[in-house]
Amino acid sequence: MGEIATLRPREVVRQDVEAIAVIYRNLGAPVAEQMVTRALGQLALTMAGIAEQVRSQELRDLARQLARFGRLAADLGLLSLAAVASDAGACLEKADSTAFAAVWARLLRVAERSLAAETGLADQSV
């Protein structure tokens, strides 16, 4: 028998820092920092709510929640997160549970990397 390889997917997170820069230019640093921090918190809370829905297998309203999550991520320039959320919603709409499971695992990885990378987002955009 051969060796068993353990695959550890590492997601590349794409973001558009210009989205945050525009917020800072339009609102000024103090207000923009509060707004971006609030939006990131809302994004994290929304992801936690979606994760709870998946764990409890309450999929009825999940596509709408994923669309909302994707829009919020896109507004913050989190392109990868928005795209994967859209893909997960598409899997739900097609009732493809196997694809949804795979995309859900990817969404968890991308969300973790995106939100961890965003802790210093406000400081990078001034």
Image: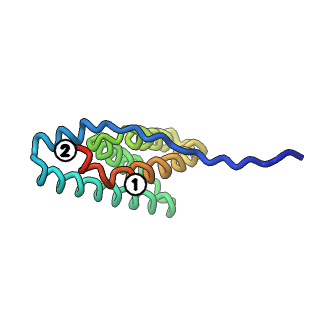
Foreground label between 2 and 1: 2
Q: Is residue 45 above or below residue 64?
A: below
CA distance separating discs 2 and 1: 19 Å
Q: Is residue 90 above or below residue 40?
A: above
Q: Which residue is mark 1?
A: 116
Q: Which residue is mark 2?
A: 126
Please tell me which residue is depicted at 24% across the width and 56% down the height of the picture: 37
Can you tell which quarter of the image residue 26 is in? top left
Q: Position of residue 86 (x, y in %)?
A: 41, 40
Residue ranking furthest to the right: 1
Please name whichever residue, 22 or 52, is drawn nearer the observer in this view of the structure: 22
Please name whichever residue, 52 or 42, is drawn nearer the observer in this view of the structure: 42
* Residue kind at label 2, given as amino acid type: Val
Crowding at label 1, few (<14), some or many (≥20) Cα neighbours within 10 Å?
A: few
Q: Position of residue 116 (x, y in %)?
A: 40, 54
Label 2 vs 1, first from the N-terminus: 1
Judged from the image, the secondary structure of the residue bearing numbered disc 1 is helix
Please tell me which residue is depicted at 48% across the width and 40% down the height of the picture: 12
Identify the image quadrant of the C terminus: top left
